[in-house]
Image (cartoon, grey):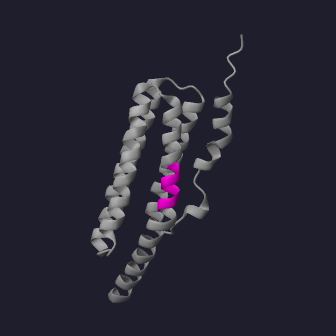
């Protein structure tokens, strides 16, 4: 009897939606680089679930995603505090909401619930794209103007 699993192939078709695209650039190179890493890690985790990676591999991938996301938030929030970004608290709360989804993903992986883990990855991917398009672009515009102002003051 064949072990054909249609859900495996459906997930592989949708994997490309979690790849970073130039359209996600906010033109703050260090933040864009971090975003690219987050997309790569989400994509790798999704491919691991779709490709039948063992639970230990998935937990390692999820841990790596968690670490990079936490480091990214720390870095971005430090930039906001340093520049006096007026929407810092609002932006920080957006970051906190993603942590809820990340914890949900970790629980699903720990239980071996791949279908729910896959849905949680989709939610995280959608959150990341929407967050970059709105919250991060707002901050990036402020940050670039702040840098220009600092450069002008220094001249």
Residue 34: x %, y % from top left: 45, 55
| Farthest residue, direction right | 1
| Farthest residue, direction top | 1
Instruction: Please tell me which residue lies in front, 55 or 27.
Output: 55
Above or below 70: residue 86: below
Query: Taken as a whole, is the magenta stretch helix, strand or loop?
Result: helix
Residue 106: x %, y % from top left: 39, 35
Above or below 91: residue 56: above
Query: Quadrant location of residue 30?
Result: bottom left
Residue 53: x %, y % from top left: 53, 26
Q: Residue at x 38, y 37 (%)?
A: 63
Q: Residue at x 58, y 48 (%)?
A: 18
* Boundaries of the magenta span: 125-131
Q: Which image quarter is the C terminus in?
A: bottom left
Q: Which image quarter is the N terminus in?
A: top right
Residue 6: x %, y % from top left: 68, 28
Q: Residue at x 43, y 38 (%)?
A: 105
Above or below 18: residue 145: below
75 left or right of 4 in image: left
Instruction: Please tell me which residue lies in front, 116 or 51.
Output: 116
Above or below 109: residue 128: below
Q: Residue at x 29, y 75 (%)?
A: 84
Query: Total label count?
Result: 0
6 left or right of 96 in image: right
Judge whether residue 85 is colored magenta. no
């Amino acid at each position: 009897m064949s072990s054909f699993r249609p859900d495996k192939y459906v997930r592989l078709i949708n994997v490309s939606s979690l790849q970073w695209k130039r359209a996600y650039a906010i033109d703050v190179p260090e933040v864009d680089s971090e975003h690219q890493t987050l997309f790569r890690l989400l994509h790798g985790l999704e491919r691991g679930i779709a490709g039948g990676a063992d639970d230990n591999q998935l937990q390692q991938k999820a841990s790596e995603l968690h670490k990079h996301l936490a480091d990214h938030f720390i870095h971005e929030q430090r930039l906001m505090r340093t520049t006096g970004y007026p929407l810092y608290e609002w932006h920080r709360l957006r970051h906190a909401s993603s942590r809820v989804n990340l914890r949900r993903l970790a629980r699903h992986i720990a239980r071996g619930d791949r279908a729910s883990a896959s849905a949680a990855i989709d939610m995280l991917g959608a959150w990341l794209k929407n967050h970059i398009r709105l919250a991060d672009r707002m901050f990036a515009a402020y940050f670039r103007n702040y840098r220009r102002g600092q450069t002008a003051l220094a001249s």
